[in-house]
Image (cartoon, grey):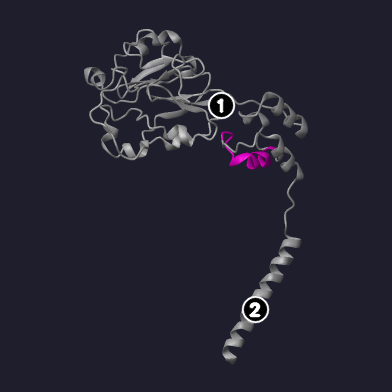
């Protein structure tokens, strides 16, 4: 019995000692946070999307206050809000071009040959494990809306072809759709890049077209029609070396529509569901 009481007393003594140490450390070693951080955070949109490169709006506010970044790096804030933050901190507003998610597939349900009906787990990640969900092209969009569900900003809607439509105005370039897509069909692009390769198949010619009506067949016309050095063919697909210099002209002779000029939302002529 005495041994139990002794052990208990030792435990309480150790706990009390460390409690005193922590209390003293908190009083004398605590680093006071600059009150401007909370004020700046209140001026930010609160989306915590991470598009600025920081872990949420609080992290971005901290970086702003210590001068590690500029208000314009928040592509979600309105120009007026950016200006207000810059005025409050007495810094230049700076600028970062808005980026948006772009889908590299145009093969909707009417374009891709179906090999079988998929009846498994209703997610792209589930379908990709079962013969690509029954579609002939195993590299194309599966149309099961993982990207739509994961988008917290309602910037993605599935259209009548079961393809994701990205709303440029609502997209914050948070990257969630990039991460969730099991086929890596999304990239984040500056909004000024208007020539988009909407095919990801590595096969070419008749084989590509037999899988999908809008597949790139690697004819190379887009590279020939673009300014020199802007587009090159690599792995059976056009690669935009200088995307900002690509002009609409380079899309005109594409026989399948695999490379497109976009203005605003993708598949603009098609109506999104929901």
Q: Main secondary structure of the magenta part?
A: helix
Q: Distance between the residues labelled 1 and 2?
A: 56 Å
Numbered range of the magenta stretch: 51-64
Q: How many labels does the image show?
A: 2
Mark on residue 170?
1
Q: Earlier in the sequence, mark 1 or mark 2?
A: 2
> How many C-alpha atoms fall within 10 Å of the one at disc 2: few (<14), some, or many (≥20)?
few
Disc 1: CA contacts within 10 A as few (<14), some (14-19) or many (>=20): few
- Measuring from the top left, give residue 103's x and y in whole percent: 42, 25
Per the rendering, the mark at residue 7 is none
Say which of 241 and 146 sits in front: 146
- Residue 30: where, in percent of width, then height? 72, 57
Say left or right for 153 vs 87: left
Q: What element carries label 2?
A: helix
Helix, strand or loop under label 1: loop
Residue 12 is tagged as 2
Q: Position of residue 188 (x, y in %)?
A: 48, 28
Q: Quadrant of the N terminus?
A: bottom right
Q: Is residue 181 left or right of residue 91?
A: left
In the image, taking residue 179 as reference, residue 79 lies left or right, namely: right
Residue at the location (31% across, 19% down)? 111
């Amino acid at each position: 019995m005495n041994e139990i009481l002794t052990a208990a007393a030792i435990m309480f003594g150790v706990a009390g000692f460390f409690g005193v140490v922590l209390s003293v450390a908190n009083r004398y070693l605590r680093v006071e946070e600059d009150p401007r951080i909370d004020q700046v955070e209140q001026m930010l949109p609160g989306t915590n999307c991470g598009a600025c490169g920081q872990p949420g709006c609080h992290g971005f506010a901290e970086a702003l206050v210590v001068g590690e970044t500029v208000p314009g790096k928040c592509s979600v804030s309105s120009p007026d809000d950016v200006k207000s933050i810059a005025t409050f901190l007495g810094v230049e507003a700076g600028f970062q071009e808005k980026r948006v998610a772009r889908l590299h597939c145009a093969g909707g349900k009417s374009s891709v040959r179906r090999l079988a009906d998929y009846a498994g787990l209703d997610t792209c990640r589930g379908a990709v494990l079962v013969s690509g969900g029954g579609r002939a092209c195993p590299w194309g969009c599966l149309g099961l809306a993982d990207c739509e569900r994961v988008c917290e900003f309602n910037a993605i809607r599935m259209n009548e072809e079961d393809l994701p439509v990205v709303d440029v105005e609502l997209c914050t370039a948070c990257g969630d759709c990039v991460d969730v897509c099991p086929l890596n069909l999304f990239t984040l692009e500056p909004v000024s890049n208007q020539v988009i390769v909407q095919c990801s198949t590595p096969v070419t010619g008749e084989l590509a077209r037999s899988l999908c009506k809008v597949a790139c067949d690697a004819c190379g016309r887009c590279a020939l029609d673009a300014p020199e050095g802007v587009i090159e063919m690599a792995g059976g697909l056009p690669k935009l070396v200088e995307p900002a210099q690509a002009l609409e002209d380079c899309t005109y002779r594409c026989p399948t529509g695999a490379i497109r000029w976009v203005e605003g939302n993708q598949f603009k002529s098609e109506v999104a569901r929901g």
